Amino acid sequence: MRPARIILADDHVLLLDTLRKLLESEFEVVGAFPDGQALIAAAPALKPDLIVLDIAMPSMNGLNAGQRMKQLLPDVKLIFLTMNEDPDLAVEALRVGASGYVVKTSAASELVHAIHEALNGRSFITTTITRGMVGSFLQNLRKKPHSLTLRQKQVLQLLAEGHSMKEAAFILDVTPRTVAFHKYTIMEQLQLKTTAELIQFALKKSLLPG
């Protein structure tokens, strides 16, 4: 049986090298890319069985890139490897078709295990965040494709009220990186170009007093 063909996508070059060395003894690593756009451009021709990708990447974030990959290659398995332990993001990863969500601070063996689970048609989520996913999943289960999640609405309201991303992160008890991710995902989702447009959207939707 041939080894599974795997593609890696992460904007940290050193991590890509580390992941390649970790996986190439057991799998065939057929490509490594620094951002979502490069992944989408090259992956179809490489015919991967599985893609390991970060969420926070330049050009296009991992969730959007993963969703596009599932459109181009419906059978490909996706595993998100990220520093972000926000249950909302794990739920979003599952919504775009992920088979795994692994936190980078976990042991390397957890990623290998997640890959095996995905290739065998199962799912794997880092155990430290599964508890928080239950409420998040129930809140967002009936979410319309272009509506905002509860967490996105919270981030939008705080930013529109004039809080910095660092202040919003403190209030929501998440990392500034999580707030930044939600902000730019909202802007991508709603096709907004500036923070001013974001605030105007919040006012229009009555998330703020007029």
Image: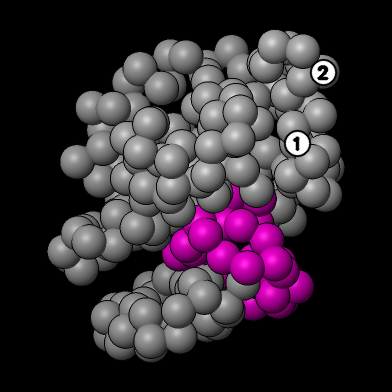
Q: On the rendered structure, is 13 left or right of 170?
A: right
**Along the line of sight, the residue nearer the viewer: 87 or 120:** 87
Q: Amino acid at mark 1?
A: Leu
Magenta highlight range: 36-65
Count of numbered circles in the view: 2
Q: Quadrant of residue 48?
A: bottom right
Residue 198: mark: 1
Percent of width and height locating residue 30: 52, 82
Q: Is 53 part of what is drawn in magenta?
A: yes
**Along the line of sight, the residue nearer the viewer: 46 or 140:** 140
Vertical order, 210 against 31 (above or below): above
Q: Secondary structure at mark 2?
A: helix
At x 77%, y 13%, the residue is 210
Percent of width and height locating residue 136: 41, 22
Residue 14: mark: none
At x 32%, y 53%, the residue is 102
